[in-house]
Image (tube, grey):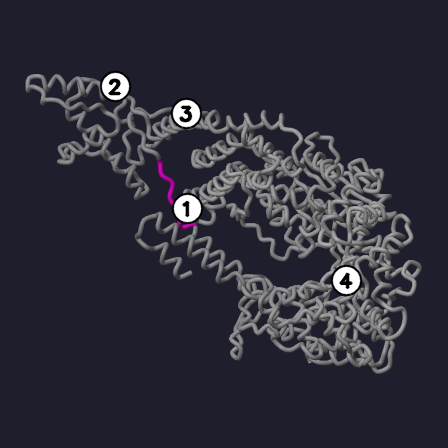
Amino acid sequence: MRWKREACKSGRGQRQQNERAERGCELVRTSTETATHPHVYTRHLHSTQLPLLVSIPKRHCNPTRSIYHTVDSSMARLQPKKRRLPYIGKSPSSAPNVPPSQGQSEAPVGGTAANPGHSSHGFKGKLAAMKSRFIRSHRGPSSSSADPVAPEEAQEDPELRQVAQDVDTQGLPSKAGPDPEPALAGDDLDVARQVFESMKPIPRAGEIAVNTVAQASTAVAELQNLSSTYLQPLKIFNNVVTTIANVHPYAQIALGILTAASQLLITQANLDNAISELLKKVGSVYAFLSDDDTIKNIDTMRVPLAKIAQVINTCAQFIRDYSETTNFWKRLGKNIMSETQTAINDYSKNLDELMQQYRDCQTWDIQINVYHVLEDLNMEGMAYTGGAGLNTMKKCLENTRTEILQDIINWVKDTHPDARRILWLHGQAGRGKSAIAHTIASWLKDVGGLGSCFCFARDRQAERREEKMLTTISHDLASRYPAFRRALGRVLAEDPSLKMTPDLLQQWQKLILEPLSKAAGSIVGNVVVVIDALDESGGVLSRKHILSLLTSKEGANLPSNFRILLTSRALSDIERALRDAMNVRAMCLDDVPAELAQRDITLFVSKELLSLKDSIGPTEIQQIVHKSNGLFEWARLACEFVDPNRAFGETVEERFKSLIAMPSDEGKTLLDGMYATILGSVVPKSGTPFLRFRSVMQQLLTMLEPLPLAALNHMHSLFPNEEDHYDVVIILQFMAPVLGGIADHSSPVRPLHASFYDFLTDHSRSGVYFIDTSESSNLAYASLQVLTKELHFNICRLENSYLSNSQIPDLAKRIKANISQHLSYSCKFWAEHLEMAKFDSCLATSVQGIVESEKILFWIEALSLLGALGSAESCLAITARWLQGHAGCEVPAALATDGVKFLQCFTTAISCSAPHLYLSALPFAPSTSLFSK
C-alpha cells in the first residue's frame, strides 16, 4: 500500500501513474489474496519455515474491507479528470454552456456579433483568446476555473507570431509566394480579417468525427476488396467440391471440413486488415485445391489433404474469433501485432509445406504445430478420466468395413436440421464395433473434426468412469473449440462447483448443452463425440442416467451440428432405452451381409498369416474365413492359434487341423469354443499347473485396475499362502492370444476382448476353467502388506508447502520415482478388496497395523499426491463396517470412524496441498479427535 500511495503522489505523467497503480494494485491483490479470505490466514512455523494454512472462524479474521477499501480509495484518486472539449468560434448547439463565472466571456469569441468596423486590435485580441484556449486544451484543466481572455496590454505579446502559425496549422490557407507590396498590405489584412470573422470553424470533436467517417469509408472499401479478392476462391471451391464423387471416406471427411470452413469464412468472417495476409494465404490454398490436377489426386493424396483440412479448420476459427482473441491478448498485456504475425506465420508455414507435399505426390509425416489460443479458462479441479480416449491401435485394417464406414461418414456430414443426433452401433461380441468407432474417431481427429472420444472398459469399472464421462467430454470440447471454451468459462465462473459435481443432470445441462448452444455458430463443421463400449460401464445402474439423458427432450434438441456415435452390445436395458428413441438411429452389425463380412475377414486373415504362406494357403484361409461366421474376434484368435510362436509341441499344420475340427456354431458359442480350445492347448485340467492358472487368473480378473507384469508379480508374491509365491510369468506367457501386455512388460495385463472375461466368469460356458471372482482376500492382504512396507512421511520428498499439488512442476516425475505402481494400486483399492473378503483374524491384524499407526496419515498424504483423496472417506467407512462387531477390533473401528469425520472437515485443504495434512489439518483437528492424539 505504501508503494502504491507513493505512485499516486509522484509528479510523473498521468499515464505512468495509471500503469504503476495497476501493477501496485495487482501486487496488493496477490500478496493479500490468502490473508483477506474470510476463513483462512497464513503464518510461518519457526521450525519448518512453511506456511500454515488453518481454518478459523469468520468473526476472528475479516480484513477484507479495510484492505480493499484502501485500494479502492487509492484507485479513485488515480482516475484521470474529465476534460472539457474546447470550442472555437461559434458554439454548436451540442456544445456545453459555460457560465461567465468560469472566467469566459459571455459572448462567444469570434461570433457573429463582431463586424468589419473593429480595429486590428480586436482581431489580435481574438487571436490571443484563441491561443489561450488552444494552450488550455493541450495542457488540460489545472484549476477549477478557466484562464480569462488576455487583456489589451497582452495583445502585443511577442508570441503573437507563433499564434498565427498555430492557427495556420488548424486549417487556415497558407500559400508560398513573394511578399505583398506595402500599398496593398492594409487592404489584404482587412479582407483576411473579415473572412476570418465570418468563419465557423469545426469543433475538435467534429474534426474527429469527420476523420472517423473518412477512415470508416476507406476501411469498408478495403474490406469489400478483401471479400472480392481473397474469398472468391472459396466460393469457387464450394462449387467444384459438389462435382467430386467416388472418393475414399477419409477424403470425404477432409472435403467436408474444408467446405464448412469456407462457408464460415464467407458468411461470418471478421475481415480485419490485420489478418488480410492470412486470408490471402487461405484463398491461395482453396485456389490450389480447385485446380484440376489437385482434384485428380484427391483419393491417393488423402493424407496431406486431411492435414490441410486440419490447418484450414483452425485458421477459419482464428479469423472468425479474431476480435475475441485480441481482447484476450489485451488482458494479458501482449503485443497484438506481434502475436497476430506469429499466428499467421505458423499457419502459412504449415500450409505451404502441405501444398508442396501434395504437388510432389508424396506422403511423409509433417509435424503440424498449429498456433492455438487458449484463453484464460481455469479447468483445474474439473473431473477428468485419463486413459479413456482414442486408441489408434484398434483401427480397422485399411480397405475393410468400407460400406459401414461410408454410411457413418454420410451421417456425420448430413446437414439436414432433422438428422438424428445419435447413432447407436450395436452387435454381438466380436463383430468389430470398437474397431469401427476408433477408425471414425481417428479420421475425424486427423482433419480436426473430433470433439471427444470416451471409452468404457470392463477392467476399469472401479474408476466409475460413468460419473466423469460428461465432464471429460466437456473438457475435451473446450480444448478443441475456442467458442465452446469461452462459453464454458462463463458457466464455471458463475458456479465453480460444477467442476466436481457428481450430478449428471447438471453436467449435461451446464457443461455440455449450454456452452454448446452458444458456440454452435462458431464451430467449423459438425462436432462428433464417440462413446465406445457403454455396455462395459458396469451394472445397469451405472448407465441408467446416461441413457436417460441421451434419450431425453434435451437430447432430442441437441444443436444440429452435434453428433454422438455410441457403441455397445444390445443388452436389454440399453436396447429398451435406445430402440424407440426419436433422436437415435440404430445400426446393427449383425445385419451386415455375409459376403461383405467374409470379404473383410479374408483381407484380415491374409495379412495376418502372410508369413505362413507355405503352410497356410488360399484354401486354408477360406476355411478359416468360413469358420469365423463373420466374427472378427474369432478370426483374430484363429490367427493367434496357428502362429508357430504360440504352439507348444505342435506344428502349424496340426494346429490348423485342430482349429478346423472345432464344432461350428453361431454367436458367443463359437467364441467360447475358441477360448476352450486355446486354454486346452496350454493349460492341463489338473495338478499344480492348473491350480496356478486359477490363482493367477483370479488375481487378474478381480483386480480393479490392470497392472503391468512386474507389479502383478510383486503383489502375487505377498499372498498369504506360500504355494502362491512363484513367478506369474510361467503361466501368463502362454496366454498371449487372449491377454494383452504379455510381450510388452510396461503395458497393463488385461483380456484383449471383453468376451474372454465373460467366458471365464460364467461356469456354464467355461466349465473347468471357471474363475470365481466373488472373493478377494488374497489381494486385500497383499495390498495391506504393501502399505505397511512402503508408506513413509513426505513420500515424494517435497521441499516446501508453498505450492499446491497442481503447481509442483515435476510432481508426475516424483510420483513415478517414489510411488510404485503396486503401491499406487494398494493405496486406492485396499479397502474395496477388504470389503469383498470374509473376516479373518490375520487380515484384521494387518488392518489394525495401518489404522492405529502413523501409516494412516502417510496413506492420506499419498492419496492427495495421486489425486485420489476423494475415495479416502469411503475407504475408512468400509473399514469401520468390516471391523464392527468383532472382539478386539473396537479401537481400529473407532479410529476409522473418526477418520471419516476428519476427512469431511479437511479434504479440501489436503487435496490442494499434501503437506497441509500435517501443517493445517492435524493442528486444528478437535482435541477430542483420535487423529489428533
Q: Are marks 2 and 4 in contact (CB under 8 Å)?
A: no
Query: In whole angstroms, how far apart are the C-alphas of marks 4 and 1?
Result: 63 Å
The picture places residue 409, in percent across and down from the top left corner, at: 70, 37
Choose mark 4 or mark 3, whichever is in front.
4
Rendering coords of residue 579 (x, y %): 84, 40
In the drawing, what numbered circle is on residue 763? none
For disc 1, the marked residue is 335
- Circle 2 residue: 198
Mark 2 vs mark 3: which is more N-terminal?
A: 2
Whether residue 696 is situated above or below residue 597 in the rendered picture: below
Q: Residues within 10 Å of mark 2 (few under 14, many from 20)?
A: some
Q: Which numbered mark, 2 or 1, is in the foreground of this view?
A: 1
- Do residues under tags 2 and 3 come within 8 Å of each other at their CB atoms? no
User: Could one spot residue 537 in this view of the protein?
Assistant: no
Secondary structure of the residue carrying numbered label 2: helix
> In the picture provided, is 536 more to the left or to the right than 308?
right
Choose between 523 and 332: the one closer to the eye: 523
Q: In the rendered image, is residue 460 in sight?
A: yes
Q: Residue at x 36, y 24 (%)?
A: 92
Magenta residues span 76-84
